[in-house]
Amino acid sequence: VGQSEFQQSFRTLAQRRGSRLVLALDVEDYGRARGLAEACGGELAALKVHPEHALLWGVSHAELVKTLSGLAGGAPVILDAKLADIGESNAFKARYYFAQGYGAIICHGFPGEKAVKAVVGEADARGRGVLLLAAMTSEGHLFNESNADALVAIARQAGAAGVIAPGNQYELLARIRSRLGSDALVLSPGIGAQGGEAAQAFRAGADLAIVGRAIVNAADPKAAARELKEALNQAAGGR
Ligand code: NUP
């Protein structure tokens, strides 16, 4: 029940913000990250950071979430933790990160259903979300149709709010979406710098796009974010 409530509230929030764009704040300088959150915030559904950003930027996780979300007009911050541990360890990491204010956490499914359920349990207790990596965008990855199917089954059985699926591999993305059903959230990185196209990724079943370099390295990040936001809204059509 917890994760379906998160699905609903995340969709409603994205709708209210008028955006299907998640900005990956992949910059090494905290001042730059803050500038990007502030400039692009109005164009975004959410922000995404890695756990290492707190170390790199020299701020606590709690401070990072509060500051960046505040600058971006209250956008939730998704943590790209890629948790891949046994249930007990996954649970303590998730508990810690959720307590810092992260709205959702990304985890791997290959440690198995029980390990994912441990993260979902922590998320459900706090109204937060879990997104499972069904496949990756990286060149030469070891995901294929058969293990992506197994990972989608784990996402469903563990009750995750949704998955991360590659926005640069349309057939695999479409397969993941069809096996996952329409309620679950599908967030797709890989658009822009990794060769994916928004229209094709959304046709294949993405709900939201996770984009870093195409925005953060643009001469005018705010304009790039706005253009992309509009392209994504158009690609999503009435969905
Ligand atoms: O399969 C994945 N591919 C991927 O690029 C899973 C991810 N979480 N990501 C992340 O999305 C990656 O770590 C980066 O933060 C972002 C994509 O950035 P860019 O290629 O748009 O710059």
Image: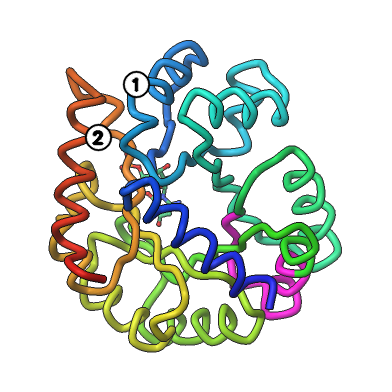
Q: Residue under circle 2?
A: 225
What residue span does the magenta drawing correspond to?
Answer: 105-120
How packed is label 2: few (under 14 Cα within 10 Å), some, or many (20 or more)?
Answer: many
Q: Residue under circle 1?
A: 39
Q: Answer with left or right where residue 43 lies relative to residue 16.
A: left
Q: Is residue 108 magenta?
A: yes
Q: CA distance from mark 2 to mark 1?
A: 9 Å
**Closer to the camera in the image, 54 or 112:** 54
The spot of residue 79 in percent (x, y) is: 58, 45
Q: Is residue 92 magenta?
A: no
Toward the front, the furthest residue is: 16
The spot of residue 148 in percent (x, y) is: 43, 79
Q: Quadrant of residue 219?
A: top left
Q: Are marks 2 and 1 in contact (CB under 8 Å)?
A: yes
The spot of residue 176 in percent (x, y) is: 37, 80
At a point 73% along the width and 44% down the height, the residue shown is 97
| Picture quarter with the N terminus | bottom right
**Closer to the camera in the image, 238 or 214:** 238
At a point 81% along the width and 60% down the height, the residue shown is 91
| Amino acid tagged 2 | Ala
